[in-house]
């Protein structure tokens, strides 16, 4: 990445996430995850944790300008398919972008997990998100068990899911 492009990227990241710095929560493993309600791409509301009781939920915060999000989101689809019958749900929460932007981005990825819209970034703030991508893993009882800050691999994602499943 050229120095000019790198500087522009960092500036864009800081500006887009600047709203996340105000009253940013510091979530701790072993504590209940914050509840929220967000619309999916079709406008249907999804309520967490109410709609996902008894499920392992990975909440992934992302945006289309994130250089790691495209490949990572596509790479997680096989892990999701492998564990969805055992209770895994992935909520891909788009942060502060328009519905059409998010929909265009995920259209070509072939993902079957839910995409939600956090238009004002309120849920990202409540989770303490300061960079994208960020993923939180919530157990079936609604307790935060792990997080990944930044880019990850399907292997790391799957290892965390297995650890939560084995801990039940």
Image (tube, rainbow, N blue to C red):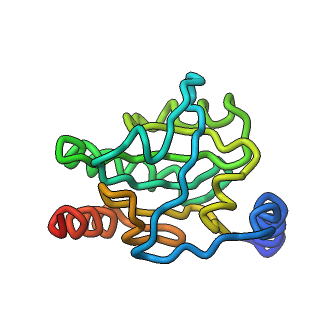
Q: In which quadrant of the rendered image does the C terminus lie?
A: bottom left
**For residue 7, above or below residue 62:** below
Quarter of image, res 81:
top left
Question: In this orientation, which residue lies closer to the viewer: 34 or 107?
Answer: 34
Question: In this orientation, which residue lies closer to the viewer: 72 or 37?
Answer: 37
The percent coordinates of residue 112 (x first, y second) are: 37, 34
Quarter of image, res 51:
top left
Give the residue displayed 76% in from the left and 46% down from the top: 120
- Total residue callouts: 0
Drawn side of residue 113 relative to residue 116, left or right? left
**For residue 100, above or below residue 26:** above
The percent coordinates of residue 143 (x first, y second) are: 39, 64
Give the residue displayed 63% in from the left and 66% down from the top: 129
Give the residue displayed 72% in from the left and 51% down from the top: 121
The percent coordinates of residue 57 (x first, y second) are: 37, 52
Drawn side of residue 100 relative to residue 147, left or right? right
Q: In which quadrant of the rendered image does the N terminus lie?
A: bottom right
**For residue 6, above or below residue 89:** below
Question: In this orientation, which residue lies closer to the viewer: 1 or 84?
Answer: 84
Give the residue displayed 46% in from the left and 46% down from the top: 91
């Amino acid at each position: 990445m050229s120095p000019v492009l790198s500087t522009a990227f960092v500036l864009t990241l800081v500006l887009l996430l600047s709203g996340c710095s105000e009253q940013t929560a510091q979530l701790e493993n072993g504590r209940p995850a914050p509840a929220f309600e967000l619309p999916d791409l079709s406008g249907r509301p999804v309520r967490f944790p109410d709609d996902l009781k008894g499920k392992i939920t990975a909440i992934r915060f992302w945006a289309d300008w994130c250089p790691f999000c495209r490949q990572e989101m596509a790479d997680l689809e096989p892990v999701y398919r492998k564990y969805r019958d055992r209770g895994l749900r992935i909520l891909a929460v788009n942060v502060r972008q328009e519905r059409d932007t998010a929909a265009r981005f995920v259209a070509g990825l072939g993902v079957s997990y839910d995409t939600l819209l956090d238009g004002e970034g309120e849920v990202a703030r409540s989770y303490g998100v300061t960079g994208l991508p960020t993923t939180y893993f919530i157990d079936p009882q609604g307790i935060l068990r792990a997080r990944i800050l930044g880019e990850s691999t399907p292997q790391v994602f799957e290892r965390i899911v297995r650890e939560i499943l084995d801990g039940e």
